[in-house]
Image: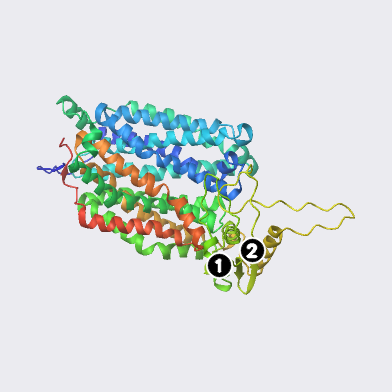
Amino acid sequence: MVTMNPAYEAPRNMTREEKKVIFASSLGTVFEWYDFYLYGSLSAVIAVQFFSGVNPTAGFIFALLAFAAGFAVRPFGALVFGRLGDMIGRKYTFLVTILIMGLSTFIVGILPNYEAIGFAAPVILIVLRLLQGLALGGEYGGAATYVAEHAPHGKRGAYTSWIQTTATLGLFLSLLVILGCRVSMSAEDFNAWGWRIPFLLSVVLLGISVWIRMMLSESPAFVKMKSEGKTSKAPLTESFARWGNLKIVLLALFGVVAGQAVVWYTGQFYALFFLTQTLKVDAQPANLMIAAALLLATPFFVIFGSLSDRIGRKPIIMAGLALACLTYFPLFKGITHFANPALEEAIARAPVTVTADPNECSFQFNPVGTSKFTTSCDIAKAALVKRGVPYVNEAAPAGTLASIKVGETVIPAYTATPAPATEVNLGHGPAPAASTPAPAAGATPVPPTPATAFDGSLKAALDTAQYPAKADPARVNTVMVTLLLFVLVLYVTMVYGPIAAMLVEMFPTRIRYTSMSLPYHIGNGWFGGFLPTTSFAMVAATGDIYYGLWYPIVIAAITFVIGMIFVKETKNNDIDAV
């Protein structure tokens, strides 16, 4: 258990050595996050390159899942590298993590695509993502612990908040490099081979990061503990098999980190997916607006981290959670209003309703391709989801053929014939119907298939109701969208800026790396990492483009309640206690 510091050390200026520690740790972590975020930023391109055997919607979802695979394994990386960090030291452990991360990212840049080597391409890609997740699972705890153990009492929030900027700066750097590649070549070249350049550049960043970290000395707290022979022989057992510490681990997860994670991923990832996939804003302006919001908000990581040294970590984190819960719906509705006003107008003018037998409506989330969605309800919903059109559900009597009502126009759906067993069909929507062959000269025309007739009628109805196929660039209010995105990222800085210091202060030195890493990576790897796919599946099931926001709101609300009642303030804890 961490004790209160009996002697308060008056705040002082940062020493040269402390500046070096913060710079080296932060810069190396920026590069590591850059590596990790490249995949998320390029998920749409990667879906085409490595999952080209599936339909576009399914490919995007499968690509997101491969992105999430890196998050799913992060807690296991926390266990492996946390144990090493508590036994052999902080410095050497996060040297290993950055080597694994950098090499895995470089290999993605040279990996042949699906067309070249078939099924082996996505398999190797997901293995590389797993390695990245393992490495990242050991990275954060090491960097946060290392910096905090160099920081004087009264400055831990300020010092560790620089580590907190690294995730945002890593994302910003990845977006910047991607945009540079996009504007320097044609879209065709970028999609064919230019997307590999940001991955290949990681080998340069890897060399810089390793060189910087080699210059660092071991954490003074760890050196002192090791010289006294007080290092833990079984950090996993001490951290998770003893109730006194396990209780704190659980409080850290459910009372602090889970809510922080969903607020973070909503502000930095879900917002981007919402812009591009739901509101159909072009990728380049969407990335620019996200990048601008990140750039404007990043200083607030340090501001809120420093403020937490004065008023405490808990008040700032809890305030960020509360604001997110109360304002997410109006903020995202505002983004719709300013990014795609034509969609908002069409929804008000001609609302869309899917009338169907609830028993034939599936939850269309099938990443492994074992199900075929062929009922009229699934076909109707899949067609609307693909077009980014929101809808409401209306129950019909059993056996009723599903239909879509756009304004006053009703389009009946159809029941499809299941695809042959040999056909790959992942994700939303039924197996694609065979196209109608063109009739030979002089032959009797072949009537259109039900799929062709349905698609034509739906498109005509949506066009008549003026549902936009994509956001009109001339009507995107860039300033207001960026401002709303800035507010979302500001919440991220509130919950994330003080959290490294708080987690370090919750646990004793001998098992700190292990104890803080696991709840952090379960929270961010599972609660946060799976947010995009979970929220998009919720939207597809309900037709409400804002329904996915309930996921982060509920998690953040639960964390707020647990944190307010059970989590104690930590800013005055003595982190040298073993």
Residue lying at the far front in this picture: please name it.
398
Question: Which quadrant would the N terminus be assigned to in this image?
Answer: top left
Which image quadrant for residue 87? top left
Residue lying at the far bottom in this picture: please name it.
408
Image position of 202 with respect to 438: above or below: above
Q: Position of residue 566 (x, y in %)?
A: 20, 54
Cα separation, mark 2 vs mark 1, equals 15 Å
| Left or right of 129 in this view: 357 | right
Q: Position of residue 63 (x, y in %)?
A: 52, 44
Image position of 200 with respect to 330: above or below: above
As drawn, the label of residue 398 is 1
Residue lying at the far right in this picture: please name it.
442
**Residue at x 41% of width, y 53% of height:** 267
The residue lying toward the viewer, choosing from 48 and 493, is 48
Image position of 532 with respect to 160: above or below: below
Residue 110 in sight: yes
| Left or right of 380 in this view: 363 | left
Which image quadrant for residue 266? bottom left
As drawn, the label of residue 413 is 2
Residue 174 in sight: no
The residue lying toward the viewer, choosing from 24 and 69, is 69
Q: Position of residue 168 (x, y in %)?
A: 40, 46
Mark 2 secondary-structure assignment = loop
Q: Amino acid type of disc 2?
A: Ala
For label 1, count other residues whose C-alpha is less than 10 Å away and answer few (under 14), some (14-19) or many (20+).
Answer: few
Which is closer to the viewer, label 2 or label 1?
A: 1
Q: Position of residue 436 (x, y in %)?
A: 75, 53
Mark 1 secondary-structure assignment = loop
For label 2, count other residues whose C-alpha is less than 10 Å away and answer few (under 14), some (14-19) or many (20+).
Answer: many
